[in-house]
Amino acid sequence: MNLIKPTLCLLLSLTTLQAFSQYTDVINSNRPGVSRSAFSVGTNVAQLEVGPYMIKEKRTPAASYEVDGFGVDFAARYGLIWEELELNIEGTFQSDTKTYTTNISAEDDRANFKFLTIGAKYLVYDPYKNSENEKPNLYSWKANNRFKWKSLIPAVSVYAGANYDTDNNPYTAPGIEGFSPKVMIATQHNFSGGWVFVMNFIKDRIGTDQSDFQYIVTLTHSFSPKWVVFGETQGIQSDFYADNLFRFGGGYLWSKNFQLDTSVVFNTKDTPSVLGVNLGMSYRLDFHKDKEIDNGTSAKDEGDRRSRKDKSKKTTDVIEEYNKKHKRKDQSFN
């Protein structure tokens, strides 16, 4: 509970920063992995991310049990009004069989949302906004590829949303139901050489008996414009559940709007042990249009300029003709 106050204070302080955005020509997916990128999908971009998975859990100490099942992670994202703003709905639905392996065997068939959240993310700081204005050094490869200290400054976004939990959900603590707040800070470093480092700090189900703190750290590396691999660790701490999960996998960019991915997840404890395999895809409908910059080069602007130029020329001709007539009159008097 001591983490709530500093987390909320940091969220409020970050919202005063100047915000910028970054729309990408190819799909900007949170997959593979479960961390959230600091960047939005861009205005008028609708994106769906789905990942079916198989899961196996086994608890060795009493009360021992085994869980076998499957589920699906999903997220729908949409960029609205501003480039920095993203609305999203995300969740995980799981169906499994929990078998108790004590002296009296029993089975429990379960199916429900492990979580279902709707919220909004806003990019409050983008250190890469003016990176395209940096000119490369034409005489030094080393100068263009050396480490830059400013790359340590991450892009930062804030997230606020609400969970919805149904009554008697087998995946939540007893008595958890209805809506509860969720907040998050997401940071992202884009290093040279295709390395991306993402961190999420999450306070979930605030004010309930299952209020937990999570951190997610993801390192991604692209070997080519098509292939990417990643490693990730996720820590979860609450009175109801605590764990440290590890994920590894990769993704393939099929086209600029379609991505495939796969990953495995496991932990290192036996209360319970976790092993899962995930296959996923991300697809976007891109209706994004860059804002037009009026630099006075449109056909209408050019026509107006010519019209003003013609009027100015006619006025000049009239003045010159007037001056000539008066000059001749003056000469006749002399």
Image (tube, grey):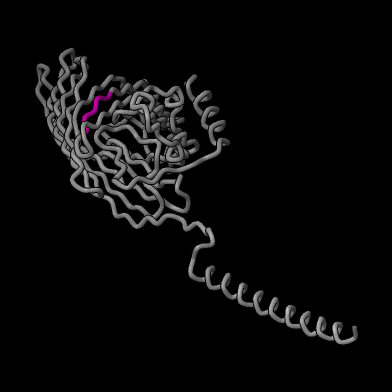
Location of the C terminus by quadrant is bottom right
**Quarter of image, res 328:** bottom right
Residue 213: percent from left, percent from top: 39, 24
| Residue 241 sits in quarter | top left
Q: How many marks?
A: 0
Q: Please give the name of the residue rendered at 29% of the width and 31% of the height, measured from the top-left corner.
A: 194
Residue placed furthest toward the front:
334
Up-down: is 321 above or below 240? below
Reply above or below: 250 against 117.
above
Q: Nearer the viewer, residue 243 or 286?
A: 286
Magenta range? 228-232
Residue at far right of view: 333
Counting from the top left corner in percent of width and height, residue 12 is at 55, 33
Judge by depth and name the residue closer to the eye, 184 or 115.
Answer: 184
Task: Please tell me whether residue 243 belongs to the stretch shown in magenta.
Answer: no
Left or right of 50, for residue 18: right
Using residue 244 as the reference point, say whether residue 180 is left or right of it: right
- Using the image as rendered, state which of residue 225 and residue 258 is in the foreground: 225
Please provide percent x and percent y for residue 228: 22, 33
| Quadrant of the image occupied by residue 310 | bottom right
Question: Is residue 25 or residue 287 the one in the foreground?
Answer: 25
Residue at far top of view: 61
